[in-house]
Amino acid sequence: MKLNELTAHELHEKLVGKEVSATEITKTVYERIDAVEGKVNSYVTLTREQAIAQANEIDHRIKNGETVTPLMGIPIAIKDNMCTDGVKTTCSSKMLADFVSPYNATVMNKLNTAGTVMIGKTNLDEFAMGGSTETSYFGTTHNPWDLERVPGGSSGGSAAAIAADEAIISLGSDTGGSIRQPASFCGIVGLKPTYGRVSRYGLVAFASSLDQIGPITKDVTDAALVMNAISGHDAMDSTSANVDVPDFTKALIPDVKGMKIGVPKEYLGEGVDQEVADNIQQSIKQFEAMGAKCEEISLPNTEYAVSVYYIIAPAEASSNLARFDGVRYTYRAEDANDLMELYCKSRSQGFGPEVKRRIMIGTYALSSGYYDAYYKKAQQVRTLIKQDFEKAFETYDVILSPTSPSAAFKIGEKASDPLSMYLSDICTIPVNLAGIPSISIPGGYNAAGMPIGIQLMGKAFDENTILRAAYAFEQNIKDTLKRAPLKG
Amino acid sequence: MEYGIVIGLEVHAELKTKSKIFCGCSNEFGGQPNTHVCPICLGMPGVLPVLNKSVLEFAMKAGMAINCEISRYSKFDRKNYFYPDLPKAYQISQFDLPICKDGYIDIDVEGETKRIRVNRIHMEEDAGKLVHTEGYGSSAVDVNRCGVPLIEIVSEADMRSPQEAYEYLTKLKSILEYTEVSDCKMQEGSLRCDANISLRPKGQEEFGIRAELKNMNSFKGVLKGLEYEVKRQTEILESGGEVVQETRRWDDEKGVTSSMRGKEEAHDYRYFPDPDLVPIEVDEEWIQRIKDELPELPDVRKKRLIEEDGLPEYDAGVITASKGLAVFYDECMKGYHNSKVVSNWIMGELSMYLNENNMEIDECKIAPAQLAEMLKLIDNGTISGKIAKTVFAEMFASGKDPEVIIKEKGLVQISDEGELAKIVEEVIANNPKSVEDYHNGKEKAVGFLVGQIMKATRGKANPALVNKLLKEKM
Ligand SMILES: [Zn+2]
């Protein structure tokens, strides 16, 4: 296998054994990018020179006898909504097409400390609003398993980069499923941590009470390694939790004997593809074969989750995105005659249709006279959804469901039907509303050969239990897992 | 028909914490445009606010001094509106759960104490400001002030005259100064006041239609703006018209208010809880700690000056209204015994010079101990009370010690009887007409002769001695 096809922990072994250098790894990754990026379009910006320099420096440090830490010299792709000092942060929007952040997101500082090598900034749905990466100003990203299909979204670029071996590890952000759904569409691993586990400082906000940064990786072990690097309390983020951070790799034990797994019936109802439902039944059998106990459960308020989400997220977004007004660093309309025109034209021209749609929904939901009926009511139902989970976790260690009702769909298939696009988030949204952690791992493949993901949800700040279940499952089906068939 | 006046005030005070409310930038006034800034107060993509604890403590302190209840649980909300001086396009403020509520301030109205209720005090961040440059067809934005911490103090509509509003504002300013939470300089904008004012027929319970008044940039401006509004609204009502609910702008130069925007143009701010900030929870221990830090407040200090120092109520009121004056007074009393004399000098010469030079007491060069020293020099006859005024003027200008000034300018009083006698004899000899007038019973002639002696001594003659010698020699 080529170096770029390996996982972070495999490359780490080779770096420790001095079999390869960080520079060689980085160069191999760029060779792959040169070969396939034209077809996939994972990246908005590539940082080749900076990356080679970073890798050289790492090699120098290793040569000088520095201990090689787990992510040292590992190429990473960063979703282009995380601020990187001196490198463009576009959010895949015309509005920020030329924006260069003057500061680093906290996760970037942490990754620099860990010694990762940033390969580039990856494509996303504009301002992370979407589930297919089709709303990007910089063009659609293509699924490495089938270039005519979407990679999922909004972290579609990060997921495609990993599936196409254009990076070893990556970061995504997840507001309603934006890490997990693309991971499942691309046949890899995506973890949305507990809200507050990872600092949001420097993540361009979409919906502040839901957004969370997390890893998208080739396997569960790499996800745990990235979690070790990016987690922890940050004085710059009031909502980051001041709780102990465990060593996530300690959870990587292939043993689920006695684990109680709940399978909510609401996640397997109407609208879920038969092949996806079948895959869950098969997964249940596998877990049971490993000694876990699976039972059907009910999370009765699930049916309201999509409605609640599509009030709260746009409401917060309408306020978060108001700063993009043409006055400072954003796109500015040329032909404005006064202030009001400057605002209206800059925002009309700078934002794409999906972003505008959500800003309008959110503005409406917060308007005087509607606030109580929409935003306030949505917050109350959000509490009920959270309580559903809390109740379930009194009995169960993990909750298992599909990550998405279907495998990756065709590009353009849902682009003109926002409602059907919104409904495809049904399995992932409740997790964000409840603030709990959840991981998507490959569960199998449909008849067309596209990956199907399974989702494991856990208690708040108990990522370790889902990591353990995910690791055990992954080890169990390891031999059946495939690679994306994309040729260079 | 006679009308009753109903006034409520909304006062914004900048808190003088070291750093801004949600970032580490300096909170100092002024500075070159856009120098006290960072990604956070610039509202760059991805930044998050973190509450500066001192802001919360300053707000609690102000609340306690205004007799408010401190909320054990409060939160921040976003107030959404577009304006180029507001980089995030929302202001972080407190909407329905403010940090302080239900307080009051007692004011003096014609010798009676009147209680003005305070509805709430909330914390918020200030916006930047626009600098309009002539001729460029554009405006520049200075965001130094973005994120400067503010408290907004909202009174009930309890004031019944512009004068009461003026008294309330004066008292509020003195409380904020005493607690050292704000500089309260209206010219620099660290204290800003908006007013609601309406009229209603005497005897009617229900409030009339109100106008909101903005842009009153001084205490006098508040008084004049409200007085103008009373006149304007009275005229409307008397001619059978109806007052329009609107926001009006006070023009200090023209002395009139004019319509800024009507009720229908009012913004929908789309308030909602700021998801980037966690709710504020304050426990009893914390509240007690802040309470223990509270200094002596104006009312208590005034009582002390009356009861312990024996000052007349009026003097005590004037001196304690300004924390600076009160501290000056207390310090001066450490070096001098007579409170009324100290109070006379503070309310007289000192206040006069401060007003003339448009200065605050903290900018004054005279140290309280220097004034005490000067008063002792009067008592021991080194200088006369009249000369003292000259000495004081020089002290105010240079900050020099009174002894130094007296020495440099040769202002020591002539109390030597022999020396003075010669001058008296000379003056008598040169003014036979006045001496004759005196002997003919014209007391006024003495005044003229004293004047001549003072002229000859350049004011340094000991007045008592001059009088005595003059009468003896004639
Ligand atoms: Zn700042």
Image (cartoon, coloured by chain):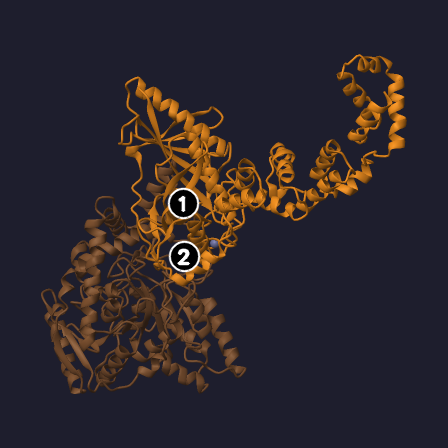
Q: In this view, does B348 lie above or below B297?
A: above
From this viewpoint, is residue B89 visible? no
From this viewpoint, is residue A463 visible? yes
Residue B49, label in figure: 2
Report the Cα–Cα distance between label 2 and label 1: 20 Å
Q: Which chain letter goes with mark 2?
A: B
Q: Is residue A100 above or below residue B192?
A: below
Residue A383 position in % (x across, y down): 22, 62
Q: Which chain letter goes with mark 1?
A: B
> Counting other residues with Cα less than 10 Å from the Cα at mark 2, is it few (<14), some (14-19), or many (20 or more)?
many
Secondary structure found at label 2? loop
Residue at 15% of width from left, 68% of height from top? Answer: A299
Which of the two discs, 2 and 1, labels the residue nearer the N terminus?
2
The residue lying toward the viewer, choosing from A70 and B431, is B431
Q: In this view, does B6 lie above or below A42?
A: above
The residue lying toward the viewer, choosing from A224 and A74, is A224
Q: Which amino acid does label 1 sit on?
A: Glu
Q: Which amino acid does label 2 sit on?
A: Pro
Q: Quadrant of the C terminus of chain A?
A: bottom left
> Counting other residues with Cα less than 10 Å from the Cα at mark 1, is it few (<14), some (14-19), or many (20 or more)?
many
Secondary structure found at label 1? strand
What residue is shown with label 1? B152
The residue lying toward the viewer, choosing from B324 and B319, is B319
The hue used for chain A is: brown
Q: In which quarter of the image is the N terminus of chain A?
A: bottom left
The hue used for chain B is: orange
Residue B292 position in % (x across, y down): 47, 58
